[in-house]
């Protein structure tokens, strides 16, 4: 299961610390749903056009002994890349996902997954992602994806269903808050549900 990043964990300089945590209405998504007892239950954070999560995969997500299954790694990357669209007010459907596995992703050790918007067009949004070791920045996997915005009517339905909001977080390095919370009267966005 995922859990919030430790406030005392050392971090590589290129890894964001402060931001906003996404809070969603309860749902069954395998990746981020709190109602799916067999899922990943990712805790997602955003900062501008980047989304990240930190977690420790347990053995139920294992492929070969001691190594996370590639499908699980791909799922995590898809989730953080899709949620990187959130500040663009888009609900995106995954059109293409390409993952490059650089090193085996260990189970039982903390990992960090990050996704960012690389290019946003009217019809397609291109993203990049990576899974890293959070203290050293060692890269386990990288990814690229393309998302297609859902039709506006479907986006309205999803906004009403998932009612997400941003919860400000404190930067342990400075004690200051991350980006402020989005007012509840503004439209929300999410990924493919």
Image (cartoon, grey):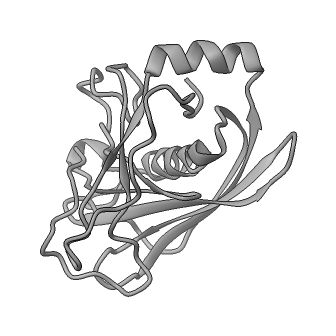
Q: Which of the pair 76/184 is nearer the observer?
A: 184
Q: Which of the pair 167/40 is nearer the observer?
A: 167
Q: Which of the pair 60/142 is nearer the observer?
A: 142
* Residue 121 in the image, given as x and y percentages of width and height: 85, 49
Give the vertical position of 185 relative to 109 (above or below): above
* Residue 93 in the image, given as x and y percentages of width and height: 68, 32
Give the vertical position of 26 relative to 93 (above or below): above
Q: Residue at x 43, y 28 (%)?
A: 184
Q: Residue at x 57, y 43 (%)?
A: 86
Q: Residue at x 82, y 44 (%)?
A: 124
Considering every residue shown, the one lying at the far left of the view is 8
- The reply, left or right, for residue 63 in relation to residue 139 is left
Number of disc labels:
0
* Residue 116 in the image, given as x and y percentages of width and height: 60, 60
Considering every residue shown, the one lying at the far right of the view is 122
* Residue 84 in the image, given as x and y percentages of width and height: 57, 51
Q: Which of the pair 48/139 is nearer the observer?
A: 48
Where does the C terminus fall, quadrant-wise?
top right
Where does the N terminus fall, quadrant-wise?
top left
- The reply, left or right, for residue 5 in relation to residue 145 is left
- The reply, left or right, for residue 91 in relation to residue 147 is left
Q: Residue at x 64, y 38 (%)?
A: 89
Give the vertical position of 7 relative to 93 (above or below): below
Question: For residue 10, what is the image quadrant?
Answer: bottom left
């Amino acid at each position: 299961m995922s859990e919030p990043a430790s406030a005392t964990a050392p971090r590589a300089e290129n890894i964001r610390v402060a931001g906003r945590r996404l809070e969603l209405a309860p749902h069954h998504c395998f990746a981020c749903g709190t109602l799916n007892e067999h899922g990943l239950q990712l805790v997602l954070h955003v900062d501008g056009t980047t989304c990240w999560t930190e977690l420790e995969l347990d053995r139920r997500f294992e492929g070969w002994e001691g190594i996370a299954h590639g499908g699980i790694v791909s799922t995590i990357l898809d989730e953080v890349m899709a949620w990187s669209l959130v500040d663009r007010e888009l609900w995106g459907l995954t059109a293409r996902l390409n993952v490059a596995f650089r090193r085996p992703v260990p189970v039982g050790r903390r990992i960090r997954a990050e996704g960012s918007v690389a290019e946003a067009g009217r019809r397609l949004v291109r993203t990049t992602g990576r899974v890293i070791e959070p203290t050293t920045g060692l890269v386990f996997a990288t990814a690229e994806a393309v998302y297609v915005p859902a039709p506006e009517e479907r986006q309205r339905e999803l906004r009403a269903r998932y009612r997400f909001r941003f919860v400000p977080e404190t930067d342990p390095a400075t004690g200051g808050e991350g980006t402020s919370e989005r007012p509840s009267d503004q439209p929300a966005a999410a990924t493919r549900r």
